[in-house]
């Protein structure tokens, strides 16, 4: 059994990830803006664009079950980061960029400082051109540029992190 934090576990893909992890017997904490649909999963409500909330949820919050016999801080084995605006035109394009880049930066910084050695990050196939015709047709126009730009910025940031492990 592993202790896993999932960000964005209340979303479409995140909910599936939570179910799979819970079905396999892992101890899972969902960090999201709304509770998980699966009653087996505890959710910590946090806005990950706020660095204090991100650090509190990931870096400080290590007691997934506060009723554990041991109250010592327990290490988190894996962080799965799916929290993001998943597609364009859900919010204004500048908000997509702000939310996705800021939340990912905060989550990764918190993971590094908390000593979490394994991180799974969801990006987009459209970031580097696969499926680009869907993102860059007349119907979507410049909106897709924000989605592509935020993913490229985040991917570049992740490559440059000194994980120190």
Image: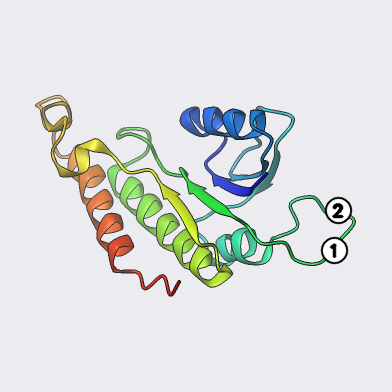
**Quadrant of residue 62 in the image?**
bottom right
Mark 1 and mark 2 residues within 8 Å of each other at the beta carbon: yes
Residue highlighted by disc 2: 68
Task: Decide: few, some or many residues near mark 1? Use Cα within 10 Å; few <14, some 14-19, many ≥20.
Answer: few
Q: Quadrant of the C terminus?
A: bottom left
**Label annotation for residue 143:** none
Residues 55 and 22: in front is 22
Kindly identify the residue that appears in the image at 32 percent across and 41 percent down.
92
Vertical position of residue 69 compared to residue 11: above or below: below
How far apart, in angstroms, are the residues tagged by discs 1 and 2? 6 Å
Left/right of residue 112 with respect to residue 87 in the rendered view: right
Left/right of residue 63 with respect to residue 99 in the rendered view: right
Residue highlighted by disc 1: 71
Position of residue 22 measured from the top left corner of the image (x, y, whole percent):
66, 33
Element type at mark 1: loop
Kindly identify the residue that appears in the image at 15 percent across and 34 percent down.
130
Vertical position of residue 80 compared to residue 10: above or below: below
Position of residue 161 measured from the top left corner of the image (x, y, whole percent):
35, 69
Position of residue 70 measured from the top left corner of the image (x, y, whole percent):
86, 61
Vertical position of residue 43 compared to residue 109: above or below: above
Q: Is residue 30 visible?
A: yes
Residues 146 and 72: in front is 72
Kindly identify the residue that appears in the image at 79 percent across and 50 percent down.
65
Kindly identify the residue that appears in the image at 56 percent across and 60 percent down.
54
Position of residue 31 measured from the top left corner of the image (x, y, whole percent):
60, 47
């Amino acid at each position: 059994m592993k202790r896993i934090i999932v960000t964005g576990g209340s979303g479409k893909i995140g909910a599936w990830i939570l179910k799979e992890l819970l079905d396999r017997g892992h101890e899972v904490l969902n960090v999201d803006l709304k509770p998980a649909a699966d009653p087996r999963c505890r959710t910590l409500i946090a806005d990950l664009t706020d660095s204090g909330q991100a650090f509190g949820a990931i870096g400080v919050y290590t007691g997934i079950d506060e009723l554990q016999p041991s109250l010592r801080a327990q290490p988190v084995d894996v962080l799965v980061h799916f929290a993001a605006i998943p597609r364009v035109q859900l919010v204004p394009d500048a908000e997509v960029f702000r939310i996705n880049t800021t939340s990912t930066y905060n989550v990764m910084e918190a993971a590094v400082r908390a000593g979490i050695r394994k991180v799974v990050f969801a990006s987009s196939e459209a970031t580097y051109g696969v499926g680009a015709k869907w993102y860059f047709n007349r119907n979507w126009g410049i909106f897709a540029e924000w989605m592509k730009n935020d993913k490229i910025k985040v991917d570049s940031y992740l490559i440059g992190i000194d994980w120190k492990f």
